[in-house]
Image: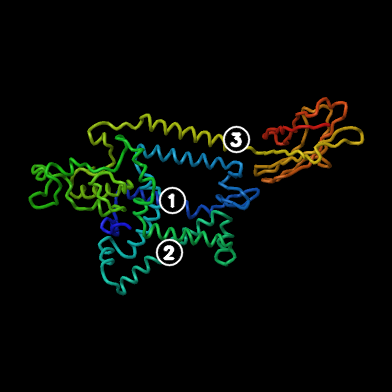
Amino acid sequence: MTDPAIQEVHIPIHPRSVKGYFRTLKNIILVVAYLVYFLLPWVPWERATGPNQAVLWDLVGRKFYLFGLVIHPKEIFWLAGILMIAALLLFFVTGIAGRIFCGYFCFQTLWTDIFVGIERLVQGERPARIRLDKQPWNTEKIRKKSLTHILWLLFAFITGLTFTLYWGYAPELFKAFFTGSAAAPMYITTLIITATTYTMAGFAREQTCTHMCPYSRFQSAMFDRDTKLVAYDQSRGEGEQGRSKVTREFKTREERQAAGIGDCIDCGYCVQVCPTGIDIRNGLQVSCIHCALCIDACNNIMDKMEWPRGLIRYSSEHEEAGKKARILKPKNFGYGIALLLSLVVLIWSVEHKAELDTAITQIRQPLYVRLSDGSIQNSYEIKLTNYTQKEQFLTLGLDGLDNATLDVGKIQSIHLRPEQQLRLLVKVKQKTEQQTQKVSDFNFIVYPKDKNINEKRIKARFYTP
């Protein structure tokens, strides 16, 4: 059993609102992220075949639709490429500017911001929320707490429902959900996402960043003395005699400097706005997500005091020591080159996506047949897949097998609709006098009538007795 004496007691954090450059930047990113997440399933996209929805992950049809791009199972390696690019981008950015992904783009940060905003809207600013938590349960507390949790659950439910709309045609899924005709997995998934969002953004919050997220643990391996971090200017803030609140004796900056006191007036504003509740003046900490709200808070205080900004700022260890930070260093340069190459390869692969896919299977029971005229016949099953959003007209031919004839039945021209897959049973005949070896290699040739599509050669083997 864990010794109760060494257990950490969780103290609820009530972040205070703040205005400034970084808070405005976070708000812009938050609005854009929510617009993309909640509206993307409803964006129409006209297609010749398939759902008219811009983004849809069709697991039943085994296709992913991304605007004009249709991803099939054989192209799933693109997912590995995207994950690699995301990892390299994360490493590259972290090496230069620390955990800005956590502070601005992480889902946990974005959803926690909204939940804190709802809490502030219903219960008031930080002092009011603290006072409400401490007061006994009465009508006011029950009303405000209940409304807060109702709005949290509503937003979490909308989050969960929107997530499921990406996996089918959104208008139909939305209607089916509320009429009770949707599949059970939709209700289960919505429930799970609702519960996890409500828990993580409403209750876990900073504990997720501090104790659950692995990124906070291995980030130090990507930091160096040139990495830009949210930092407190220790020498300026503390001076020789430490920090001090504003008093009659130490009101102006000149009076404080004469007494050896730093510019930090110990107002605690930087701690109050921190979503993880840390004191940035204690140096770099695992819980710091580099949201830079403490910079806005400190700058606001410095503006009121009419002192220079930058007591808390983005800075590196080298800059703090009076040196120049180096951004273009081997590590960052290597991440950047790898990121660029990965992007180029992925874009090239998408641009050169096969418009027509072919596969062949030889019929082996029997492997060959001797016809009445003495010629030998082999049978094959050819699979043709049209990966484009337009019709294709094809013809078949042979190459590399002397005096052989191709029998495709009554088919004169092969017609493939958009996204259609077709299987053809074809027969190849060769006269006895041309049979010089037991196994002969040859090619089927698929000729598209569309000159913009290259012909396809399918390797095959012809067997004789």
Tag 3 or tag 2, which sits nearer the N-term?
2
Q: Mark 1 belongs to which amino acid?
A: Ala
Q: Which of marks 3 and 1 is nearer the N terminus?
A: 1
Residue under circle 3?
Answer: 352
* C-alpha span from label 2 to label 1: 20 Å
Neighbor class of circle 2 (other Cα within 10 Å; few <14, some 14-19, many 20+) is some
Q: How many other residues sit within 10 Å of disc 1, few (<14), some (14-19) or many (≥20)?
A: some
The answer to which of marks 2 and 1 sits earlier in the sequence is: 1
Image vertical order of residue 59 relative to residue 442, above or below: below
- Which x, y percent locates residue 5? 25, 58
Q: Where is residue 362 in the image (x, y as percent from the top left)?
A: 76, 38
Secondary structure category for the residue under label 3: loop
Camera-nearest residue between 422 and 348: 422
At label 2, the amino acid type is Leu
Q: Check residue 33 in the rendering and tell me which mark sits there, or answer none.
A: 1
Instruction: Please determine whether, in this image, residue 98 is positioned above or below residue 59.
Output: above
